[in-house]
Amino acid sequence: MNNPNENPNTIIDFENIYVSYDVKPVLENINLKIKEKEHWVILGSNGSGKSTLIKLISNDLYPNTKYSFKKEIFGQARWSIFDLKKNLGIITNDLHNYFEKQGSFLSAYEVILSGYFSTIGVFKHQDFTDLQHKKALEVLEFLEILKMKDKKVSQMSTGQLRRCIIGRALIHNPKAFILDEPTVGLDIKAQNSFIKLIQKLSNKASIILVTHHIEEIFPEVSHIALVYNNTIFKQGKKSEVLSSENLSEIFEMDIKLEKENERYYIKSM
């Protein structure tokens, strides 16, 4: 039933979507179309609606107003969560924190294997094939953490655990990744290393990076969506949307955007 090949060129196709908690609107008039092979950054301040937008994409939230709307992912309006995760790798800080607290006894290898069943851990009743074990080792090597395959979550740095969680999604070869504030908790060196990993991932799948950090916008990013006041303020090609004027509007302060060595930064005003 779930066949993402029905519309192979579109990852997200949202039109006229509203979401509210009780009577309070949290997303209004959301229109967003993301195609395969595009790399997007969804940029906005804290409280602008970015986290709610992630939940809408991951099917943890649904439109709940009287307005007619279109909400399709990979050309389908309905998905089982398990099948969706095979096509869309969703990496959130909530998932990271859950593994940190509930999966501290797991090894890097087990975290990645757990992706096959979307569980927190590996259990005796779960049978893994030789190919699945081989794939887990290949993922560890791709993520450059093969040497720590037996290292426990409790002994890992923030960056190491985050790589394992990406590996847990990568086990399915998803067509796209959603990365929510991916460098939170990382020092400057680890941040730079992680952005390089995201660039490497972008050769395998589309990247949708959700952040409020300008410096996370890596060169391969092709499109930007600016979230402001619970809606998408502007969206389109990076060259057309990412400007000092637009950033000043959504962050409600004077911003001077600069670029050096293909990376963006904010110049002090």
Image (cartoon, rainbow, N blue to C red):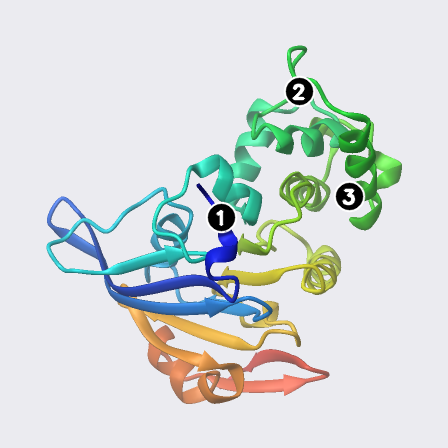
Badge 2 or badge 3: first in the primary sequence:
2
- Drawn side of residue 211 relative to residue 140, left or right: left
Q: Nearer the viewer, mark 1 or mark 2?
A: 1
Q: Position of residue 103 (x, y in %)?
A: 62, 24
Q: Position of residue 237 (x, y in %)?
A: 49, 82
Q: Which one is in front, 199 or 15? A: 15
Check the picture and name the quadrant holding the N terminus.
top left
Badge 1 or badge 2: first in the primary sequence:
1
Residue of label 3: 139
- Drawn side of residue 174 relative to residue 30, left or right: right
Where is residue 17, by image quadrant?
bottom left
Q: Position of residue 172 (x, y in %)?
A: 65, 42
Residue of label 2: 122
Mark 2 Cα-neighbour bin, 10 Å: few <14, some 14–19, many ≥20: many
Q: SS class of the residue under badge 3?
A: helix
Q: CA distance from mark 3 to mark 1?
A: 25 Å
Residue type at tag 3: Val
Is the C-beta separation of discs 2 and 3 under 8 Å? no
Q: Which residue is at 82% across, 42% downward?
A: 138
Mark 1 Cα-neighbour bin, 10 Å: few <14, some 14–19, many ≥20: few
Q: Position of residue 266 (x, y in %)?
A: 54, 80
Is the C-beta separation of discs 1 and 2 under 8 Å? no
